[in-house]
Each structure stands twice: as C-alpha cells, then as structure tokens.
Image (spheres, rainbow, N blue to C red):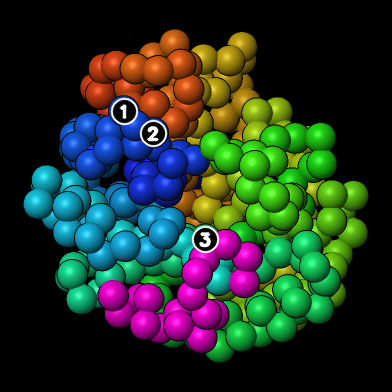
Amino acid sequence: MLDSVMIWNEPNNKSHWDPEIDPDWVMFAETARLAGQAIRAEHATLPRVLGGMSPIDPVFIMKMQQRGVLDEVEAVAVHGFPLDWNNWLIHEWPEKLREIQAVTHLPVWVSEVGISTFGAEEVQLWGLKRTAELLIGQAPRIHWYSLYDLPAHWEATTRHREAEGSSYYRHFHMGLLREDGTPKLAMEEFEKHTPHLGICQWFHYQDHRLDDAVTWLKRLGVTHLRTGLSWADSFRPDALAWFDRQMEALRDFHVTATFCFTPEHRGIAPHHTSPPQVKEEFAEFCASMVRRYAG
C-alpha cells in the first residue's frame, strides 16, 4: 500500500522536535539514520524521504549530510506557507528550491504547501493558482496542505498555540473543504491541477473524516496522498486496527506515510516533540509499519 515513507515531520521546527533537548539535531540525526536503515532492511526499494523542513534551511540539510542521514534517504522535503507563516514572498518558491538543490544531489519534494482562508477564500484561490504556476514541473512530488479544515474543537500541532496570535488560528483554515465538508472557492481550481498536485491530509486516531476524504480525493483526481502513521498513536487501544482501516481505505492512492510523534512515556521529556529515550524503538516502529503495509 505504501508508495514511500517519510522520516519525521518538520524536524527543524520546535512544534515537532524539541530544540531545548536537542539544539543542534544531533539526536535527531541518529534517530533518523537508524530509522532509514531499519526501513531499508525491511524493504529493498521503498523510497525514504527526510521529513519536510520548515523553515527551508540549507544549513539543516548540510548538517544532515555531515551526520550520515542523507545516506539513508532517497529524497528530502520542504514545507512552505509564504502567505501565512513564512517571511518570504510566494514568488520566491523557485529560489527556495534552488537553495536546497545547491547543497544536495537528492530530489527535493514539496511535501506541504498551502494557503489559508483565514482572511478570505479569494486569497487561497489566488495563492493556489500562483503556487501551481511556480511549482508544477519544478519538484517531483507536490502535496497541497490540506483537504480539510482542522475542526475548531481540536488543537493544532504547535508549541506556540494562542501565543501566536492570528498565526495560530490560520492552522484551522488550510483546507479546500470547510469543517462541515462543503467546498471552498479554490476547490474547482485545485481539480484543474491534479494529478500534478497531490494532497497532504493528516488523519487523527479514529478520524471521522476518513471515508468522506477518500470520496473527495477520488472525485478530484488525486493520485498521491501524504498522511501519517503516528508512533505515539501506536500505543492507543486497538491502534493496529485503526492503522489497518486507514491504510485499507487509502489503498487506491500512492501513499507517503510519515512516521513521527514520540509517545510521551518513551520520550526524554513527556511530549510528542521529544527525542526518544531509546532511538532504536522508533526505528523498530518504522520497520514494523513497512513490514505491515509495504509487503
């Protein structure tokens, strides 16, 4: 069922990896390297991708090269949200890709790019058109973030929360579909760019949106989907049954599964952003998911 796997998500973002415990990503590099080796031991050809950077930072990639991480992946990925969070212009996308291409021979994926409707749906519509113009043909894989708005009663995965001001609330308005499942203005435009544009959609444990999401993805002509298989969720009751249901529902897509999120009881600190106490445990989780879903 798996087309590729991604090792962690935004490791250079404090919302996903704790810089106070691991300020120079030394522990992350060893964690990612062991995970890459474990994945390869399970599957000889499954593409491995270093989780998308946010911010886009060539120095981070050079550090990963020096520490052997890039020897254990076939691609690296970047995330960009220039109309919502990044301090650069949307027109700079080609330059941002070149910054990373200049320091690695590996292909550079855009595993998350999106525009919120926090201010107006017309902003997302224009941003989607411009993003497609700038990125299609420039990256081997592009995943638009996301299909659904984040439900208002959930929490966004961030260390800052309300302290971000309006930036926090933009997390809840990134979808092409509103929380109630109705389409926004940009939906029709997005359909014009599939299958060149894929989708990144995170499904939470027992996510009620899964079946409707599959219907929409097929209707839109999406072929490439990025989602997550959470190490932390693997300790929930009936976790494997949920993983099986999720992957079976997504069987008709080329799925990139992102392995991330430390279980609180297995982290150096009790938080999903913490480096693990035992790095090999994350590697074994990755191997077990590949064994189960990559054949």
Horizontal and vertical percent for residue 156?
66, 40
Q: Please tell me whether residue 72 is drawn above or below residue 142 in the rendered image.
A: above
Residue type, numbered disc 1? Ile
Q: Which mark is residue 112?
A: 3
- Residue drawn at point x = 26 percent, y = 17 percent: 278
Q: Specify whether 212 is left or right of 263.
A: right
- Residue drawn at point x = 62 percent, y = 72 percent: 83
Residue type, numbered disc 3? Glu
Report how far apart the C-alphas of labels 1 and 3 lie in the structure: 26 Å
Query: Picture quarter containing residue 143?
Result: bottom right
Residue with the mark numbered 1: 21
Tell me, yes or no, if residue 64 can be seen here: yes
Q: Secondary structure at mark 1?
A: loop
- Badge 3: how crowded within 10 Å, few (<14), some, or many (20+)? many
Query: Picture quarter containing residue 221?
Result: bottom right
Segment colored magenta:
83-99
Q: Quadrant of the C terminus?
A: top left
* Nearest to viewer (mark 1 / mark 3): 1
Query: Picture quarter containing residue 144?
Result: bottom right
User: Which of the pair 223/166 is nearer the observer?
Assistant: 166
User: Which of the pair 24/78 is nearer the observer?
Assistant: 24
